[in-house]
Image (spheres, rainbow, N blue to C red):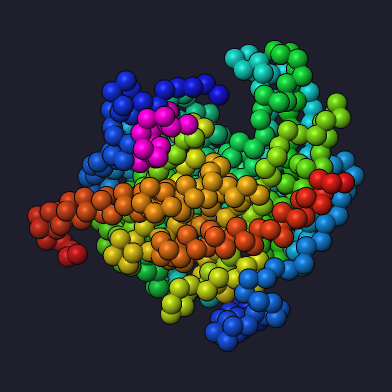
Amino acid sequence: MAFNPLFAFVNTLVPDLLKENKRMDGREFNSMRSIDLKILSDFGVQISFGQTVIVARVSAEVVEPLPHRPFSGFFKTSLKTLGSNTDLRQEVNSVIQTVMRQSRLLNLDSLCVSVGQSVYEVVLNVVIVQDDGNCFDAAILAASCAMACFRLPDGNPLNIQNLPVGVTFATLESDGDPLLLLDPTSEELAACSGAITVAVNEYREVCSIFQPGGVLLGVDALKNVIEMALTASKSYLEVIASVSEK
Amino acid sequence: MNSIEKFTPAGLRIDGRRPKEFRIPEFEMGFTALPEIDGSVRYRQGGTVIEACVTGPSERQRRTEVFDMHTDLIINIELASFSQTTLLDRNIARGVAQSHISNLKSTLKSVLILSQPHSQITIDILVIQEDGALVAAMLNACILALIDAGVPMKDLLVATSVLRFSQNPLMENGVFVDPIVSEENNACFLTLAYLPNLKVVSATFLQGRLPVQEITKPTHGLIDTAVHACQQLYEIFKTELEKRAAQTQQFTL
């Protein structure tokens, strides 16, 4: 990677602006970009946060269950990026796995068609089309919206009530508590030391916390971030609610 | 799923521990005699056995980021195929190991002082046996190996895992510290990396679904339990390291 003078300039510009309580695109610290939702064919959903575009699609097919679990269906997730950013792919993949699969959202027993013979295998495919920061939130929101509007081959919706949304803050070291930027763009992420993603649902349950290092948060600051995430999640949850109504 | 009893009739956990009791780690630093390895540790925490070797800081091998003024951190993890109760397929072992690398890298980058340009530090981790709290044990093993290699760091990072399962008839608040694999099924699981002297949290990974007050409530919530366990673990590490320093007189704390 050759020396990029624009990159170096942005790296000094962003912290300078932040000291004056300003962000590059003029937003408040705790306001997010506008969310654009598009419903595609075959139970697909495209979510855009500014220039970040993510597409998620859910599909199901009938398979045989495992012999020792004749009631249980299967739920798989897969992530693709257009481009070869493996670090990003690893992280978003692990966040999606944690939020969608390990929080046991989908009751696998509800995917049973006939005991011991056929069950549904539900597959969630997520594609990062364009990355301008905050792929985590967009990917989780796209996945949740896709799950909300999906219908199984027999016409029923999936048996889920508590779809999660992710809230990401970029964190920058400062004299007091670290500064928190909601819904960071890729320039802000590059200039900040780290980020924390909290996934919550509408029942005030936390599905995942992902803070892989980067900035050092005090214990109270960490608890504060979780509370802020709960407040900020309301606008994302409204998007899911609007999809479920359709 | 299946309802394995989490408690014995005496009210203890299935391996005989009390809920907030963690397995005391034993470690052997500098176990390898290979001259090219700068620091190494064989780390054992109950059934979890990990070997970590550190080489560096040495000359940077990758020529791609010429203008990067920081030390490059390279982590390789290998999961032995016999490390879990069932034999692991090679590809699955590699996939699981890959998924931990980027998390470990970010966590260690936040605590190590990596300011030497054009250099790199390589950490090779071999997981010989895995019995719960893998990420926390890998972080602890890495930090001890880095101390053995003499790499500067902001504080002694300590990591623990705590777990909460939903039904809890007996023990208070249902929080287990340092779970084993059979306790990890179907539970909400938090791994926390803590810097005890700076009193800050370096990394947090939570999976599972839990009401927010169970995580943030004081003293008995997951975060406070993990921080408390990290502080106790730090005292254990500190005493051991001070003992070794007195014996070898190689470094001071």
Is A123 situated left or right of B52 in this image? right
Residue range of the region highlighted in magenta in the rendering: B167-183
Q: In this view, does B201 lie above or below B46?
A: below
Q: In which quarter of the image is residue B178?
A: top left
Q: In which quarter of the image is residue B235?
A: bottom left
For the point 35% across and 33% down, the residue is B171
For the point 76% across and 34% down, the residue is A158
Give percent across and percent down for residue B197: 28, 65
Q: Can residue B200 be seen in this view?
A: yes
For the point 42% across and 49% down, the residue is B221
Comparing B51 with A62, the one in front is A62
B169 falls in the magenta region: yes
Give percent across and percent down for residue A178: 48, 72
Comparing B50 with A124, the one in front is A124
Give percent across and percent down for residue B230: 32, 52
Is A170 situated left or right of B204 in this image? right
A58 falls in the magenta region: no
